[in-house]
Image: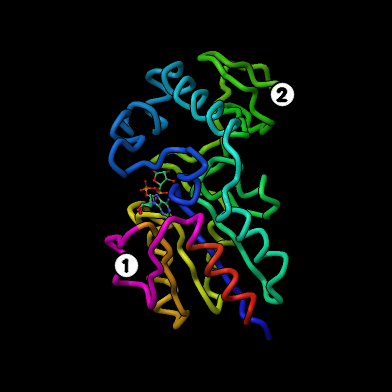
Amino acid sequence: MAPKIVILTGAGISAESGLGTFRDKDGIWTKHRIEDVATPEAFARNPLLVQEFYNARRAQAAEARPNPAHAALAELQRAHPGEVVIVTQNVDGLHEAAGAEVLHMHGALAGALCGACDHRWEAPAAMGAEEPCPACHRPAARPDVVWFGEMPYYMEEILDHLLSADLFVAIGTSGNVYPAAGFVEEARVAGIETLEINLEATEASALFDRTLTGPASEAVPDWVAGLLRG
Ligand code: APR
């Protein structure tokens, strides 16, 4: 049976597509406070500030193109004989743009959600403070992204995949935010091989069996090519 691979990606895989990471120098959280733009309380307090923060990221993501790392993972999903599950913490659409199937555990900039009736629809380019929901018409539309303090999406499905994997790979993530940061520990306890691919060593590197360092646009295609060569 061909090995099942579960891959977790973070902001680092989209860095070379021009999208900012969060915790690198001049990262997104050096310019905005999480409690101002990425919590339900922030949205309740100042919906316009939050909508404008995501409007800017949505516009930037719309201009971005997948880089060779996204393309390599899509190729792996197509060509590897075993199942390849990609879970991303990212809210950009670059994995899909490269042709991959992906589980957005932190939601997606392309999605809008009604805080009143739970209706979901394709987000417009920009949303305002009192954005009406197309279903219930109440002014409760928000980005369909998971804020701090909210439950990530697909957790049951993700953990099922993770615990039935033969290899867990974390790409371009600092391992700072749970529950994603805990996946490597879950894999280790389950005796699953673990690999980290990152520009540099992270605080979590010691938890991985192996670490490949380098820019994702080089390290990921190299790793995929080696794997597909068998
Ligand atoms: N290639 C590979 N890795 C890179 C590159 C690159 N070109 N550039 C940066 N990195 C790595 C950094 O070394 C770092 O380990 O990407 C990681 C980015 O870490 P963070 O900025 O913390 O992003 P991430 O881990 O995705 O954050 C997780 O935190 O703020 C929340 O919801 C947000 O999904 C996000 C979550």
Residue 210 inside the magenta-drawn segment: yes
Left or right of residue 188, residue 155 in this image: right
Q: Is mark 1 within 8 Å of ligand 1?
A: no
Q: CA distance from mark 2 to mark 1?
A: 46 Å
Left or right of residue 131, residue 122 in this image: right
Question: The residue tagged with tag 1: helix, strand or loop?
Answer: helix
Task: Check disc 2: other Cα within 10 Å, few if <14, some if 14-19, many if 20+.
Answer: few
- The colour scheme used to paint the residues is rainbow
| Rendered residue at 49%/24% (across/down) | 56
**Residue 48: where, in percent of width, then height?**
45, 16
Residue nearest the viewer, comparing 3 with 154: 3
In this rendering, the answer to whether 132 lies above or below 38 is: above
Task: Check disc 1: other Cα within 10 Å, few if <14, some if 14-19, many if 20+.
Answer: some
**Residue 39: where, in percent of width, then height?**
39, 33
Residue nearest the viewer, comparing 19 with 189: 19
Question: The residue tagged with tag 2: helix, strand or loop?
Answer: loop
Decide which of tag 2 and tag 1 comes sooner along the chain.
Answer: 2
Find residue 43 and name its label: none
Q: Which residue is mark 1?
A: 205
| Rendered residue at 58%/68% (across/down) | 224
What amino acid type should be assigned to the residue bearing mark 2? Ala
Residue 138 inside the magenta-drawn segment: no
| Rendered residue at 55%/34% (across/down) | 61
Q: Which residue is mark 2?
A: 135
**Residue 30: where, in percent of width, then height?**
28, 34
Residue nearest the viewer, comparing 32 with 106: 32
Q: In the rendered structure, are the residues bearing label 2 and label 1 in contact, judged by CB atoms less than 8 Å apart? A: no
**Residue 133: where, in percent of width, then height?**
65, 21
Region of the chain picked out in magenta, as a range: 200-218
> Is the C terminus in the top left, top right, bottom left or bottom right quadrant?
bottom right
What amino acid type should be assigned to the residue bearing mark 1? Ser
